[in-house]
């Protein structure tokens, strides 16, 4: 009888966990970015104007420069390690390293979806949304205006999700494709700085 009671308790706890767990996504289709958390979602219309592919021994990166209807730009970056490697740090630390940032202020976090303001080396600020679906992949979107970034946070956040710090306004606007990409992927970043590490199967 005790085993049955324990089994029921474990199943109930698991069901409650699955029911309350946040589910997020950050996806790019041909002409639209979709940011979703649970049943809420936001769509951003875009047009791809440039794509770059970076290949390292342990990592593949796709970089896409996207144009808005007002002429402003967003940058979308998807990265995935090969099967024997994984990201070594939490998503926020990885993003800080990839952008060579002085500081990263997390304003929103639910499940594995984050909204942050990133202070890059020259003191300029980028609004960024990123998601780490597992230890081997990371998706990063940056370049949103203050208003759109704040509206996105307000739309997605629930009573369980709090703004963790106040926003800095007057962020960097991306308007030149030649200088839009702000990340600094390199072999040194992966191998010496330890961004990527072998998978621990133990």
Image (spheres, rainbow, N blue to C red):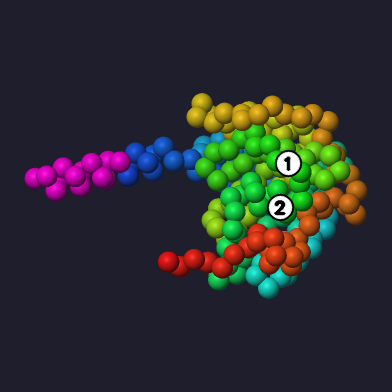
Residue at position x 73%, y 41% from top? Answer: 103
As drawn, 33 above or below 195: above
Q: Main secondary structure of the magenta part?
A: helix
Q: Callout 2: helix, strand or loop?
A: helix
| Left-right relation of 176 to 134 | right
Badge 2 vs badge 1, beta-carbon distance below 8 Å: no
Q: Give the range drawn in magenta.
A: 1-13
| Left-right relation of 184 to 5 | right
As drawn, 201 above or below 180: below
Please say whether residue 2 is one of the residues in the magenta stretch: yes
Q: Nearer the viewer, residue 36 or 123?
A: 123
Q: How many circles with numbers are drawn on the protein?
A: 2
**Residue 104 position by quadrant:** top right
Q: Which of 2 and 198 is in front in this view?
A: 198
Q: Where does the image place residue 134, in percent across and percent down from the top left?
A: 54, 56
Mark sitting earlier along the chain (2/1): 2
Inter-mark Cα distance, 2 to 1: 10 Å
Image quadrant for the N terminus? top left
- Is residue 105 in view from this perspective? yes
**Residue 118 position by quadrant:** top right
Which residue is denoted by mark 2 in the rendering? Answer: 97
Q: Where does the image place residue 189, in percent across and percent down from the top left?
A: 72, 61
Q: Which of 135 and 145 is in front in this view?
A: 135
Please say whether residue 8 is one of the residues in the magenta stretch: yes
Residue lying farthest left?
A: 1
**Residue 19 position by quadrant:** top left
Q: Where does the image place residue 146, in percent across and percent down from the top left?
A: 77, 31
Q: Where does the image place residue 148, in percent across and percent down from the top left?
A: 74, 33
Residue at position x 77%, y 40% from top? Answer: 119
- Is residue 45 in view from this perspective? no
Which residue is denoted by mark 1 in the rendering? Answer: 103
């Amino acid at each position: 009888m005790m085993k049955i009671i324990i089994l029921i308790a474990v199943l109930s706890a698991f069901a409650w966990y699955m029911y309350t767990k946040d589910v997020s996504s950050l996806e790019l289709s041909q002409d639209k970015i979709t940011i979703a958390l649970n049943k809420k979602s936001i769509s951003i219309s875009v047009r791809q104007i440039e794509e770059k592919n970076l290949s390292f021994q342990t990592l593949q990166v796709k970089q896409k420069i996207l144009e808005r209807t007002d002429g402003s730009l967003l940058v979308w970056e998807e990265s995935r390690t090969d099967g024997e490697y994984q990201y070594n740090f939490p998503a926020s630390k990885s993003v800080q390293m990839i952008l060579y940032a002085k500081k990263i202020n997390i304003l929103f976090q639910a499940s594995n979806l984050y909204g942050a303001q990133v202070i890059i080396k020259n003191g300029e600020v980028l609004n960024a949304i990123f998601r780490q679906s597992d230890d081997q992949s990371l998706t990063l979107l940056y370049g949103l205006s203050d208003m759109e970034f704040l509206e996105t946070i307000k739309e997605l956040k629930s009573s369980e999700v709090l703004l963790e710090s106040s926003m800095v306004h007057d962020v960097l606007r991306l308007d030149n494709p030649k200088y839009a990409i702000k990340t600094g992927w390199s072999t040194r970043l992966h191998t010496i700085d330890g961004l990527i590490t072998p998978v621990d199967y133990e």
